[in-house]
Amino acid sequence: MDFPTATAASRLASLDVVRGVAVLGILLLNILAFAMPEAAYVNPRAYGGWHGADLVTWAANFILFDGRMRGLFSFLFGASTLLVIERAETSGRDPARVHYNRMVWLLVFGLAHFFLVWHGDILAHYALVGMIAYAMRAMPVPRLLVLGTMLALASAVLCAAIPLNIIQLQAENPGSAALQGYAQSFGVPLPGDLVKDLALHRGGYGALLADRSRDAGGTLFGLSLFFGPETLGYMLFGMAALRSGMLRGEWAPDRYRRWLLICWSIALPAYAVLAWWQWSSGFDIRVIAAMMPLTALCRPPMIAGWICLILLLARPGGALTTLLAAAGRMAFTNYLATSLICTTLFYGYGLGWYGHLSRWQLYPVVFTIWAAILICSRLWLAHFRFGPFEWLWRSLARGSFQPIRGSALGNNASASQ
């Protein structure tokens, strides 16, 4: 176990390493949203191949990573939020002012990212949910866990409305525009719709900007409606994980191993069964849509297991641990950088690879980006205290330019602070 002590250095190192894994892992699924039509993200029959290596790639992602890395990010966001609030209180600053300044500027970054770069932004959503999470900051661990569970269940109930509505439409109005809309997200889009999507993303920047602007309200509202309760619940789980010592690296190794065994003994078989059900159904749209509420029930223990596994495998001072910690300290910059890199690679105003690679062929691209993130983060932090976007966010939230020169590698202050 790599972070057995309760020192400030080890606590922050544990957060940075887990955050580094999360920022790399989230690209495993986001790459599909960058490179293929929307439905391919959840349904391999929609685009990109669903046999052989493509099927194996889909299954590995679904069983191990899908939704887990986003959830891990949400846990870490809640933990970092609580840490910032506690440090503000300790230093005599107004914690509400510190927190809401950060959230307002994060919202600005998120909206700019959404409109100008990529429709899959999560930052604006986190900012809005983070504003609500402040009210729960003082809750003890048991209340955080209970409320987080209730919110995650509420999100599952909301998501259950989608497969039920699909079943109803198939029975009553199979030719409806609403059902065709569901096919764009969960099924196999009509050939004409695929042609339009490919033309849009292989075209110029102006058309993509206009499309994002036209659909912005529905996209942001849908994200808040269906995933807002879950995201808030996961942030509360992250606060509980920090307050309990789990994310601080304070637990004994045997406790991490026990929790890993319990959590993954529940979650992994469940995900394997759900993967088999989708495959055996021929990736039927009703089954694919049913994954939203069903995976919501399995996801939290899987995320907790990931945290335990990461902290058990990491080694202080090890080469990979050091690189992951650097990537985690620059998670904000690295998240935005992946959007800039991938849109340049796949969209028409860049290299135009959109729709040209099969599912498995995307992963050499992912691994190359991972290598760049790990190496560049380490090199940057050898000369600067913060990542460039972390520095800009910190400076805007504090209302003055913050010092950035000087190596961060000997500084235990987390980049999220």
Image: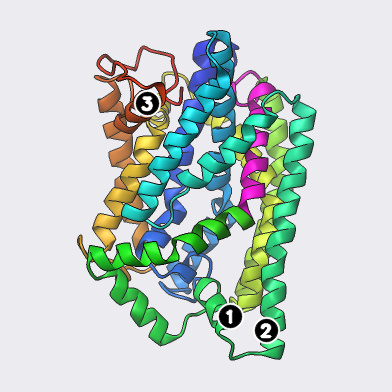
* In this view, 250 is above or below 279: above
Residue located beneath label 3 in the image: 319
Q: Which residues are magenta?
A: 226-250
Residue 188 can be seen, yes or no: yes
Q: Does the CB distance between marks 3 and 1 fall below 8 Å?
A: no
Q: Does the CB distance between marks 3 and 2 fall below 8 Å?
A: no
Task: Find out whether residue 409 is within the magenta segment.
Answer: no
Q: For the residue carrying disc 3, how many other residues have a C-alpha within 10 Å: few (<14), some (14-19), or many (20+)? A: few
Q: For the residue carrying disc 2, how many other residues have a C-alpha within 10 Å: few (<14), some (14-19), or many (20+)? A: some
Q: Quadrant of the N terminus?
A: top right
Q: Quadrant of residue 170?
A: bottom right
Residue located beneath label 1 in the image: 178
Q: CA distance from mark 2 to mark 1?
A: 8 Å
**Residue 200: x percent and y percent?**
31, 72
Name which residue lies at 58% across and 76% down. 283
260 sits left or right of 86 in the view: right
| Residue nearer the viewer, 63 or 119 | 119
* In this view, 322 is above or below 50: above
Task: Find out whether residue 242 is within the magenta segment.
Answer: yes
Q: Mark 2: which amino acid? A: Leu
Name which residue lies at 68% across and 54% down. 296
Residue located beneath label 2 in the image: 169
Q: Mark 3: which amino acid? A: Ala
| Residue nearer the viewer, 278 or 139 | 139
**Residue 341: x percent and y percent?**
27, 50
* Secondary structure of residue under mark 1: helix
Name which residue lies at 45% across and 68% down. 38
